[in-house]
Amino acid sequence: MSELIPLPQTLIPFLEPYFPNESNTNHPKKPFVTLTYAQSLDSRISAKPGTQTKLSHLETKTMTHYIRTRHDAILVGIGTILADDPKLNCRYPETKSQPRPVIIDPNAKWKYQDSTLRKICAEGKGLAPFIIVDESAGIDSESHNCVLEQGGKYVSLPLIGNTSNWAIILDSLRQLGIKSVMIEGGARVINDLLDFNKFSEKPIIDSIIITIAPVYLGIEGVQVSPSSRVDITDVKWWQGEQDSVLCGRPLQ
Ligand SMILES: NC(=O)c1ccc[n+]([C@@H]2O[C@H](COP(=O)([O-])OP(=O)(O)OC[C@H]3O[C@@H](n4cnc5c(N)ncnc54)[C@H](O)[C@@H]3O)[C@@H](O)[C@H]2O)c1
Ligand SMILES: Nc1nc(=O)c(N)c(NC[C@H](O)[C@H](O)[C@H](O)COP(=O)(O)O)[nH]1
């Protein structure tokens, strides 16, 4: 039996205009990028650094899995992996194909062999990750073998000291056949992408889907914020039993 409650049906037409489709996934140098995360009223995504905080209500948890069904890949930073030890698979009932987990881990810190994701893959419930490391990183041989055995790979790119590395990361994902990616966090990744105007003329994000939970996490929480103003356009709001969801696109 699925651990998820049924998807509120009003979310289907609400989300649809913000999803990747046949006509918006043709860019040769980057996949369609959906930035999606859950935040508190004070724009925090966890109560303390290095810990996981459940913010989404059951309805919006199901929504996250529904969004996963519509993307080729899910991307998170190594901070999220170390804090959450996530499954990064799709547990939505009608899932036809699993998204590819993509982890940005410049210094190859992740001990994949000890992870929940490795177990999920071994049980055939998800795909092995593509782990993006810096060209200088020394990769642990046990992790390397485990990732390769399960059909994942390490991808070496010039990440460290390179301020415009998102273009390189996204180009590399596109060359690996990924046409759409759902970026889930954490804070460093979200802030970087909201600050697109620092390193790119155009927003890297195509759609943004933010769950807002009715809680303040306080000043010790991990905050997300761009360094300067970012306007969101084509905005729609959905209101659930507890959470609200904002969909939009960064103004070019
Ligand atoms: N509420 C939510 O929706 C949500 C979602 C994801 C994570 N989180 C939370 O966020 C916190 C983790 O956030 P964080 O900021 O510590 O970690 P993160 O997941 O953003 O990872 C940051 C690390 O990833 C690497 N990295 C990411 N992008 C890079 C790039 N472009 N170039 C080079 N290196 C890059 C760096 O090593 C960096 O230190 C955890 O508490 C987690 O539970 C919450
Ligand atoms: N939508 C959302 N609501 C939350 O309350 C929360 N804490 C996260 N966090 C996102 C992050 O990417 C987590 O690591 C995954 O939500 C865990 O993913 P799994 O369910 O293990 O696959 N995301």
Image (spheres, rainbow, N blue to C red):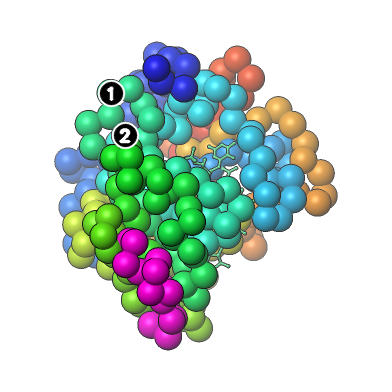
**Circle 1 SS class:** loop
Corner quadrant of residue 13: top left
Magenta span of residues: 132-147
- Assess whether residue 94 is covered by the magenta stretch: no
Q: Is residue 68 above or below residue 169?
A: above
Q: Is residue 107 left or right of residue 182?
A: right
Q: Nearer the viewer, residue 135 or 150?
A: 150
Residue located 45% across and 33% down the image = 64
Corner quadrant of residue 18: top left
Crowding around mark 2 (Cα neighbors within 10 Å: few <14, some 14 to 19, many 20+) is: many
Badge number at residue 94: 1
Residue located 39% across and 17% down the image = 1
Question: Which sits earlier in the primary sequence, circle 2 or circle 1?
Answer: 2
**Circle 2 SS class:** helix
Q: Is residue 110 visible?
A: yes
Residue located 60% across and 15% down the image = 241
Q: Which residue is mark 2?
A: 69
